[in-house]
Image: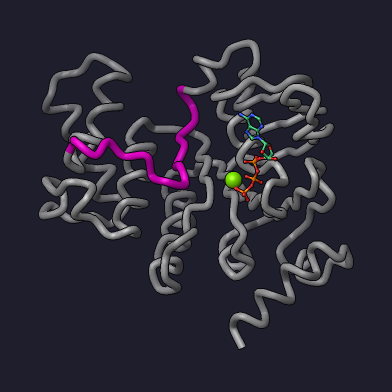
């Protein structure tokens, strides 16, 4: 589980996150939505330990991310918006890279871990030798997910996993985020601006505006929340499916 208490982040004199409090239960999927520049990526980066918060506490499975970021990072898998694959390595080597760095193992064992992860995200053997430049956007996301899952995380952090994908690929990645949770029992934080995706996959939604959490609730509650920023997003997404 993930526990965020009184988290603040400032850059210089700019306050980016203000007193964020969020609890994410074991195996829950929390969607983080909000206006562009609202601080979603910054929040995910603080949780992952990639950047340090200015104030407050973050715990991941009881490990304090701010005081013990290396240990906390071992428990988390991060899927970046850009997929962040190594362009000079094929699919299998991209996944192997983290596995071999994580722990010294016989190569055959690392290879099995990497291939199991690739299989779990729906990639097939003929994909393993492909270079990132040969992959579709959806496949790149899958490789990014396999790379994170191969390290056996208890928490998965996704930054806009479906941005830039067509509706059908979006649907398949949404299903994958859910099946990864079901299969591996991972707690998941998913930054998204896609209302339809969020309604499909999230157990709960948090909405960030100007660095503050202005709403938390179920997707059904989110769809009828009175806040004008939420209404605007919900109405726009309705208009786009009409
Ligand atoms: N390293 C940094 N130094 C200074 N300011 C930063 C830094 N990273 C982010 N910011 C600022 O923090 C604010 C929040 O950025 P963030 O990337 O977290 O927003 P976001 O909600 O993810 O936006 P988007 O929906 O566009 O991805 C922005 O105003 C951004 O300019
Ligand atoms: Mg962002």
Q: Horizontally, is 170 left or right of 6 in the view?
A: left
Farthest residue to the bottom: give it.
Answer: 242
**Ligand 2: quadrant of the figure:** top right
Dominant secondary structure (helix, strand or loop) of the stretch shown in magenta: loop
Farthest residue to the front: give it.
Answer: 13
**Which quadrant holds residue 24?**
top right
Rendered view: 227 above or below 64: below
Residue 107 locus on image (x, y percent): 13, 23
Farthest residue to the top: give it.
Answer: 67
What residue is rendered at 10% in x and 55% in y?
126
- Image quarter in which the C terminus is found: bottom right
**Which quadrant holds residue 202?**
bottom right
Question: How many marks overall?
Answer: 0
Q: Horizontally, is 189 left or right of 133 in the view?
A: right
Between 237 and 117, the residue placed more toward the observer is 237
Residue 34 locus on image (x, y percent): 71, 53
């Amino acid at each position: 589980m993930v526990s965020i208490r009184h988290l603040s982040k400032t850059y210089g004199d700019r306050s980016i996150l203000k007193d964020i409090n969020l609890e994410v239960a074991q195996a829950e999927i929390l969607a983080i939505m909000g206006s562009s520049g609202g601080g979603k990526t910054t929040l995910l980066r603080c949780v992952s330990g990639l950047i340090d918060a200015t104030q407050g506490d973050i715990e991941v499975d009881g490990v304090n991310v701010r005081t013990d970021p290396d240990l906390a990072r071992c428990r988390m898998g991060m899927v970046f918006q850009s997929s962040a694959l190594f362009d000079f390595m094929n699919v299998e080597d991209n996944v192997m890279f983290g596995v071999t760095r994580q722990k010294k193992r016989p190569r055959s064992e690392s290879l099995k871990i990497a291939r199991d992860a690739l299989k779990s995200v729906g990639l097939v053997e003929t994909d393993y030798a492909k270079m990132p430049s040969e992959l579709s956007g959806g496949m790149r996301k899958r490789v990014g997910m396999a790379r994170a899952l191969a390290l056996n995380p208890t928490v998965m952090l996704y930054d806009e996993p479906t941005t830039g994908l067509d509706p059908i690929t979006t649907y398949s990645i949404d299903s994958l985020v859910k099946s990864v949770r079901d299969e591996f029992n991972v707690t998941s934080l998913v930054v998204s601006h896609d209302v339809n995706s969020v309604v499909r996959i999230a157990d709960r939604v948090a909405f960030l505006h100007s660095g503050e959490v202005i709403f938390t609730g179920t997707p059904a509650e989110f769809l009828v929340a009175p806040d004008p920023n939420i209404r605007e997003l919900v109405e726009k997404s309705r208009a786009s499916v009409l």
